[in-house]
Image (cartoon, helix red, strand yellow):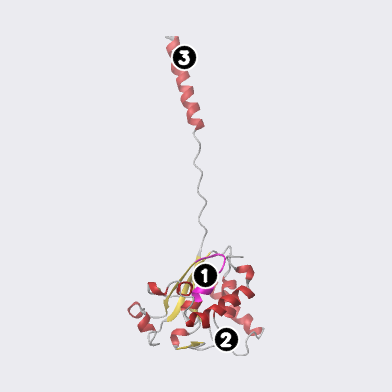
């Protein structure tokens, strides 16, 4: 009887020891906390191409903001009668790149914030310069950035960029996505957008994903 009890006890200790040797599951690293901001300023092909280059930017989606779902279609937006602006929704990691850094790139590379209802060869309200903010913090940074550029007289003309709360963003048609990278020989891309990429690399090498 005693032998059986000892056997049972020994079996129990072995079971406990085996359980103790089972490795603990390693918790997966938490995904980075991201934010989004929507920026408009000219053709969204070039806007997307510029912001895709930046370290800390997770995704850039071209689309439309400022109008309704019923008119969020390229042919309709191109009339300039829908209230939409061609825009890009930028998803980014704020621990890597800040809203101010994104706006610096926007104001000095991606578009000209002094041009009202046009950018370069593209004319119409759909090409206006807008910062569609998602929270009060983004709005404050946008207003402070404009005030800073105005105080330092970065541009000879007044900054006309609108700062408005984001209501809705509508993703553009699939064929617009990553357009500049997929059509590098397109004459518009060569003339209007590739110089912006070159300027970005020259002005902000420290912000590039490929640095």
Residue 134's x, y, as percent? 48, 71
Near-viewer residue (10 or 85): 85
Viewed as shown, does residue 157 lie left or right of 14? Answer: right
Residue 44 on the magenta segment: no
Pointer 1 with pointer 3, Cβ within 8 A: no
Report how far apart the C-alphas of labels 2 and 1 lie in the structure.
25 Å
Check disc 2 and report its element: helix, strand or loop: loop
How many numbered circles are shown? 3
> Of the numbered discs in the image, which one, if any, rests on residue 159?
2
Q: Residues within 10 Å of mark 3 (few under 14, many from 20)?
A: few
Q: What is the residue that sits farthest to the top in this orientation? A: 1
What is the quadrant of the N terminus in the image?
top left
Near-viewer residue (192 or 105): 192
Residue at image mark 3: 6
The first of marks 3 and 2 along the sequence is: 3
Check disc 1 and report its element: helix, strand or loop: loop
Residue 57's x, y, as percent? 53, 66
> Of the numbered discs in the image, which one, if any, rests on residue 52?
1
Q: What is the residue that sits farthest to the front in this orientation? A: 185
Q: Is residue 104 visible?
A: no
Taking the spot 36% from the left edge, 83% from the top edge, the residue there is: 75
**Comparing labels 1 and 3, the label whose residue is closer to the camera:** 1
Report how far apart the C-alphas of labels 1 and 3 lie in the structure.
69 Å
Taking the spot 52% from the left edge, 79% from the top edge, the residue there is: 193
Pointer 2 with pointer 1, Cβ within 8 A: no
Residue 210 lies, with reference to residue 156, above or below; the image says above
């Amino acid at each position: 009887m005693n032998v059986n009890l000892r056997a049972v006890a020994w079996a129990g200790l072995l079971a406990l020891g085996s359980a103790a040797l089972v490795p603990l599951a390693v918790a997966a690293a938490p995904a980075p906390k991201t934010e989004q901001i929507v920026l408009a300023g000219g053709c969204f092909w070039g806007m997307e191409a510029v912001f895709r280059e930046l370290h800390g930017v997770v995704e850039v989606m071209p689309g439309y903001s400022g109008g309704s779902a019923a008119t969020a279609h390229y042919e309709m937006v191109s009339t300039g009668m829908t209230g939409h602006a061609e825009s890009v929704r930028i998803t980014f990691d704020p621990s890597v790149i800040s809203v101010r850094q994104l706006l610096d790139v926007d104001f000095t590379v991606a578009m000209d914030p002094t041009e009202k209802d046009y950018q370069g060869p593209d004319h119409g309200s759909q090409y206006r310069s807008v910062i569609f903010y998602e929270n009060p913090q983004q709005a404050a940074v946008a207003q402070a950035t404009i005030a800073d550029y105005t105080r330092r007289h970065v541009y000879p003309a007044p900054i006309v960029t609108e700062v408005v709360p984001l209501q809705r963003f509508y993703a553009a048609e699939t064929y617009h996505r990553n357009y500049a990278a997929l059509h590098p020989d397109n004459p518009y891309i060569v003339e209007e957008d590739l110089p912006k990429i070159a300027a970005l690399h020259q002005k902000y090498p420290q912000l590039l994903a490929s640095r």
